[in-house]
Amino acid sequence: MTTVAEQVGAYLARLGVGHAFGVVGSGNFVVTNALRHAGVPFTASRHEGGAATMADAYSRMSGEVSVLSLHQGCGLTNAGTGISEAAKSRTPMIVLAAESAAHQVNSNFAMDQSGFARALGAESDRVHSAESALADTLRAYRKAVRDRRTVVLNLPLDLQVAAAVGEIPQLGVEPRPEITPSQAELEPLIDALSRSQRPVFLAGRGGRGAKAEIAALAQASGALLATSAVAKGLFTGEDFSLGISGGFASPLSAELIRDADLIVAFGCALNMWTTRHGKLIGPDAVVAQIDVEDSALGAHRPVDLPILGSAAGVAGALLEAFDGRERTGYRTAEVRERIATGSRWDQTPTEVLGTPGQSVDPRELSKEINRLLPAERIVSIDSGNFMGYPSQYFDVPDEFGFCFTQAFQSIGLGLYTAIGSALAQPGRMPVLGTGDGGFLMAVQELETAVRLKLPLVVVVYNDAAYSAEVHHFGADQDLATVTFPDTDIAAIARGFGAEGLTVRSTEDLEPLRAWVASEPTGPVVIDAKIADDGGSWWLAEAFKGH
């Protein structure tokens, strides 16, 4: 007899989910094995919170729907932060959550799982009966794919063991058709592009997959290119790319964006991070925003030209209006030279920090690591005072080389993100930038990385503090709650079976060169004792949003 749990797992595999993550207990044992037996790879994490963000990162970096498999009650609550991060980021993900049966009101595991899921910002659904199990599963999957949602699909224990009804259909789910605006709807933006002398295109996560169209339009219209943080790498190799817009932007990039007379956002929220609370948009600049959802248009700031449509479709339609003509616009020889020689942070002069033999400048550390690692890499970022360094100093090959799980602004998600990203892009070396606080929150998953034999480079910017709070509240406050004794993180890493390296100067990175050349089959953790930066350059801007 095939049970409902077995049917649900097999159907999700048939629909095309890419990878499953989770912690297996009695409530999700059968459905997880059904996924595995149907060909879906499964990664067992050491904590449900780790599994949630691994699944999120996998989906972002692979373009496939991921699955998070959880025990009822506490298994779901343990995964809460990761589920909320995925939901806020509109990650297509199915959370298969076992659920106490309706009559088990006195069970230790009983809780309002639907209400909990909605509180996290996720969609909540349920397998209602054996007769509806296939339809319920399809509905959840369609919602994940077509609406780009994180869906919690509750599987009541009494239904899991019931006999399955019906055969799994040969049925696929196509993404939602692209919305193409009419010529009349595009005319105001065509006119603005034709008149603009200094246009800048900002692409966000919604611009991924549309690089060719956006870049071609930028060349025709004379626009410079920039991205939000989550889309870093999208315009790698483009001569007129400014990199990340917002708090991470270099001084020159910020200047050129601020001087634009037209900003066109492709699948970019234009939130306070990307615009530095609006200061990167000049007072007289015309702002256009292109998105596939009405609710996103103008959600974070007023826009002059809201356009409902996909990034690729709108860019392609706009390009036709130029009919092979090209405008110079912002793409002058002078601007090209300034970008080539000064738009990157590693081209920006900074005072060297650190005490010889004791601490290393985090910028010099990041530059050297960037030189030592192979170009084919996938970089993940945790949250904290340090995060601008790996975000801006570590190069990535394209938009699938950078994973930024920061929608909920939780520290401690970085290691999970790096593991999920590594499994999504196995041909690239995974790299994690994290702080000592975030790394120690998540350290149990280092065992997972060792078990998976991932050639993961973990760069721990270790200043023995939650230093965002240290710099936010200042030295005149009692900081005992956010500062700690120094921890030998390299020794902890070796205890998990990884290699550990303590770094107090860039010369201490020499063993990393040998590690890279050794075709590694396990992680290396760099415990970098960094100098106090007095609050990184992006931090002051970030805290204005608190």
Image: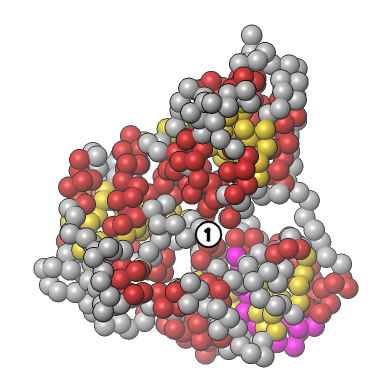
Q: Depth check: 531 or 476 in front?
A: 476
Would residue 370 appear left or right of 125 to someone viewing this image? left
Asked whether residue 530 appears in the rendered view, the answer is yes
> Total label count?
1
View extreme (left): residue: 357
User: Residue tagged by mark 1?
Assistant: 407
Q: Amino acid at mark 1?
A: Ala
Q: Residue at the spot x=76%, y=72% of the render?
A: 306
Would residue 73 appear left or right of 174 to someone viewing this image? left
Q: Position of residue 163 (x, y in %)?
A: 67, 13
Q: Position of residue 437 (x, y in %)?
A: 31, 57
Q: Position of residue 446 (x, y in %)?
A: 32, 43
View extreme (top): residue: 1
Q: Residue at the spot x=73%, y=36% of the render?
A: 139
Q: Depth check: 177 or 94 in front?
A: 94
Q: Is residue 131 above or below residue 243?
A: above
Q: Depth check: 491 or 300 in front?
A: 300
Say few, some or many: other residues with alpha carbon within 10 Å of mark 1 (under 14 / 14 to 19 / 20 or more).
some
Q: Residue at the spot x=58%, y=43% of the render?
A: 116
Q: Was residue 103 drawn as part of the magenta stretch in this picture?
A: no
**Image quarter in which the N terminus is found:** top right
The magenta-colored residue range is 191-204
Q: Is residue 159 above or below residue 369?
A: above
